[in-house]
Amino acid sequence: MSSISTSVLSDLLQALPNLRPQLYFKASLTALSHAMEDQVLAATLEQPLVIASFQQERFYRQEAHRYKRLAQRSNQIYVLSAPETDFANSSEYYEKIAFLPDDALSQEWHLVVIAQNYATCLVCQESRGSLAKTSQLHRDLNPTLDMDTARRFEGIWTAERGVSLKAAELLLGRILIYRPELAGKIKQACQRFNIGQDKSISTDQQMTEYACDIDTDPFVQRLVTYLQASQYKLHKAYRSISAQARKERLVNSISTAIRQSLNPQEILTVAAQELGQNLEACRCLIYRAQATDSEAIIEHEFLSFDVVSILGQPWSLKKNPLFQEVVQKAEGIYVVDTQTDRRITNSRVLAKLCESLAIRSWVIEPVLYQGRLLGIVELHYSSNQNLHDWQAGEFDLVKAIATSVGVALIQAEAYANLEDLNQQLEALDRTRSNLIAITGHELRTPLSTIQVCLESLASEPDMPLELQKVMLTTALADSERMQKLVQDFLTLSNLESGRVEWHPESLSLQECVDLALSRIRARSTTEKLPKITTHFAKNLPLVRADGDWLVEVLAKLIDNACKFTPPQGKITIGAMSHRNHMVEVTVADNGRGIEPKRLGVVFDRFYQEEGALRRSTGGTGLGLAICRQIVNGWDGEIWAESSGKNQGSQFHFTVPSVHYKS
Ligand code: ADP
């Protein structure tokens, strides 16, 4: 048997050219067809003719139970469908007609009811492309929307008897092709309802003859019920769309904050504010936390009215079982009611916390980046309000925000690293500029003096002997200064890079001081030095250090004291036992002193109070930096004290003493 490619709808429209087809959504057709079926079920005495044609077997299956019930009302029931699984021609309960899958009927949906006192029909064809187009649209809007509801049909629904009779005639014709053995039964129906008798039926006279005189109330009731159901579905769809839109708006506002501001603090404040406000929390917290932290400081907080703030306060993590659970599962926790949740009621700490902060519902969402915990987003709902009514999608929203917060926290980390690096670079740059300055002053100046002296000696052979001597002494002194700078620089870089070998030995401090003093006195034969006295505690133990380096430290400190103290001033060198088997050595002067705020930086490389270029006294600005490296080498400490300008200074350092275990 070959399939039929003509559509029942077009056959009907051809037969009755005055009909104007309309567009129907699937939901409307379902409502109409159910109302039509219910009308049959509501009548008791009638034996109407019912012809239903389903596009697909699955649509028939949804209705099969209704047709079984309809079969109790009438023996003239015909159901057509394309066979897919078990739908086949049969006469059990009612007539089933399986049409070929490529019959034009597979694109159509028909239901015709013909009774003595009324007739209705629904003859529709699915709009081509309606499914493809609308389903895409719906997937974009909301993936959970029922795609079926978007299907559209074009056709006729009417209670006009003439039209219904024509539709019945056309469908019965189809049935006969598939099931010719039903010819007798179909003929009976046609005779009973005058089907196929009226060749030209669309006159007003014929219409009124068959005017509908039945109770339409169940029909209308049914339609209203369906309308309500569709409305409810729509309402749900709108709600989920608006939740989605709210989520997008919120995520957008936070992403905008991330884009617009480089300051992570600002971003996190915005995030806490927006999230708390949008989800109507009484408190929204964002703080940094690592899995092993014992507590965190609340850094960002949103508060609604009348809620206690915990901003800036420590927030226990180690003792919070909920935090531990979040860390362990690497996912958020949602405590809907803290008054009944076992995790809270079983923990005294948490129960107390919920009470003191009035937390009724509690959300703890981890901020993770590549599996690493960076922080936490928390939402608290107050116990002074009704239990929070969680809306669909709100938890997703919290998760989405936590992801954005993660980006901001990573940005904050990178930012802090950058700042750190910047500071290191600045320090490096300072050292470099100092080096350039010192090279300029300390190396270039003496170098040019030496050059001038030597040049004049070479070009002026007649120069008086006296002057020649001055020239030579100056050149010599300056080359010594240069040598000292180069020497200090090399010493410091050797000490800093750990290339120095230490040879600790037991030493008498007095001897080391004497050596340092004689070195200084030998160096400054011409200038007058301040008076230097030593004052050592009795029974001072020997010290254990590398002798050369110890003398170096003493010499540098005494040298500085001499440099910054007028000749009439005085210098005292003292030593006494210090805690932890150390001896504390002090070099004190009553010279120009050091401003208290500079006491720390004097040990920095190239630090000189006047700056490298305005120095009156000789020196490289490396002396104290060298001392610090040496003292650190034997695990000692070095520090400076001074009451300020012209108040003198005291330099202290510690050196291990020799002690004998008893
Ligand atoms: P310099 O070679 O310039 O003396 P140092 O590193 O030894 O370099 O000292 C650094 C700076 O610390 C000095 O330039 C000076 O400003 C300050 N300073 C060091 N010792 C004293 C002191 N005894 N009295 C006052 N200021 C001092």
Image (tube, rainbow, N blue to C red):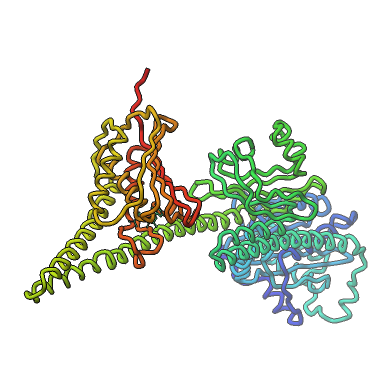
Depicted 476 relative to depicted 506: above or below: below
x, y percent for residue 338: 74, 40
x, y percent for residue 563: 34, 55
Quadrant placement of the N terminus? bottom right
Residue most toward the top? 662
x, y percent for residue 387: 79, 47
Depicted 458 relative to depicted 99: above or below: below
Quadrant placement of the C terminus? top left
x 77%, y 50%: residue:
307
Towards the viewer: 138 or 516: 516
Split into quadrants, the picture shows ligand 1 in the one at bottom left
**Residue 560 in view in this figure:** yes
Towards the viewer: 77 or 590: 590
Towards the viewer: 30 or 390: 390
Q: Quadrant of residue 441?
A: bottom left
Residue most toward the left? 461
**Residue 55 in view in this figure:** no
x 32%, y 35%: residue:
509
Answer with left or right where residue 259 lies relative to residue 157.
left
x 75%, y 79%: residue:
20
Towards the viewer: 355 or 234: 355
Depicted 4 relative to depicted 208: above or below: above
Count of marks overlaid on the render: 0
x, y percent for residue 87: 64, 52
